[in-house]
Image (tube, grey):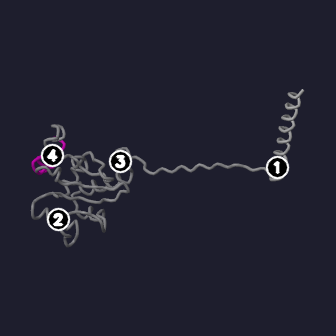
Amino acid sequence: MIRALLVLGAASLLGAGAVAGWYAAEELGQTETVVETTTETATVESGSGLPVAVEATRSALLDAARSNSFEALAPLVPDSGFTYTFGGPVEGGAVAYWQQLRRDTNESPLETLAAILEMPPVLTRGIYVWPWAYTVEKAADLSEHERELLAPLGPPARLFVGGTGYLGWRAGISPDGTWVFYVAGD
């Protein structure tokens, strides 16, 4: 008999709870839950595997360098924060410096820029750097294939100086597509 009373009491409580829940829903009004999803793409890869902004800058630089025209390259040089020499600024900026190099040393900064931008890059410290050899410590670490890839830039003995790593020409582009450097030496 006690058991029957307990079951009846429990059933009464459940029923009362259901009625109370219904009453509360009616009094407070029905609530509706809405879920919105927003999708955002931070970086879209190009066919080259580079972020689109990086590939766009690389492509523009490569086209200008292949044209062998400093005038075509000049608008691509950022107004500030761009490294082109480890010495002080040159009057006329980066383009004037590269033109002076071509006159005084017979170097070909535009041809070299085209050559390195055709090589694979390396991502280091958040910057895409051409050529990939930028992170190689010493020439002795290069495979024969890697030496062949670097051949258009000169002999490894000129590109890697005693324990300092790669010191040849290199170009860097930040993930947002900003050209941040084109420099040689240390």
Estimate the spatial distance between the alpha carbons at disc 1 and disc 3, rounded to whole Å: 58 Å
| SS category of the residue bearing label 4 | loop
Q: Which residue is mark 1?
A: 24
Q: Amino acid at mark 4?
A: Lys
Residue to which mark 4 is pinned: 138
**Is the residue marked by circle 3 packed among few (<14), some (14-19), or many (20+) residues within 10 Å?**
some
Of the two numbered discs 1 and 3 on the same chain, state the one appearing first in sequence: 1
Please give the residue where the numbered disc 3 appears in the rendered image. 50
| Mark 1 or 3, closer to the camera | 1
Which contiguous range is marked in magenta?
148-161
Residue 40, horizontal then vertical, whole percent: 51, 51
How packed is label 1: few (under 14 Cα within 10 Å), some, or many (20 or more)? Answer: few
Among numbered discs 2 and 3, the one appearing first in the sequence: 3
Q: Secondary structure at mark 2?
A: helix
Real-space Cα separation, disc 4 to disc 1, in angstroms: 77 Å
Residue lying furthest bottom in this view? 91
Magenta span: predominant SS is helix
Q: Are marks 2 and 3 in contact (CB under 8 Å)?
A: no
Tags 4 and 1 in contact by the CB under 8 Å rule?
A: no
Residue type beneath disc 3: Leu
| Quadrant assignment, res 76 | bottom left
Identify which residue is drawn at 14% across, 44% down.
Answer: 139
Of marks 3 and 4, the one in the foreground: 4
Residue 113: name its quadrant: bottom left
Q: In x, y percent, where is residue 48?
A: 34, 44
In this view, the mark in front (4 or 1): 1
Q: Residue at point 21% right, 71% down? A: 92
Q: Is residue 52 magenta?
A: no
CB of mark 3 within 8 Å of CB of mark 4?
no
| Callout 1 secondary element | helix
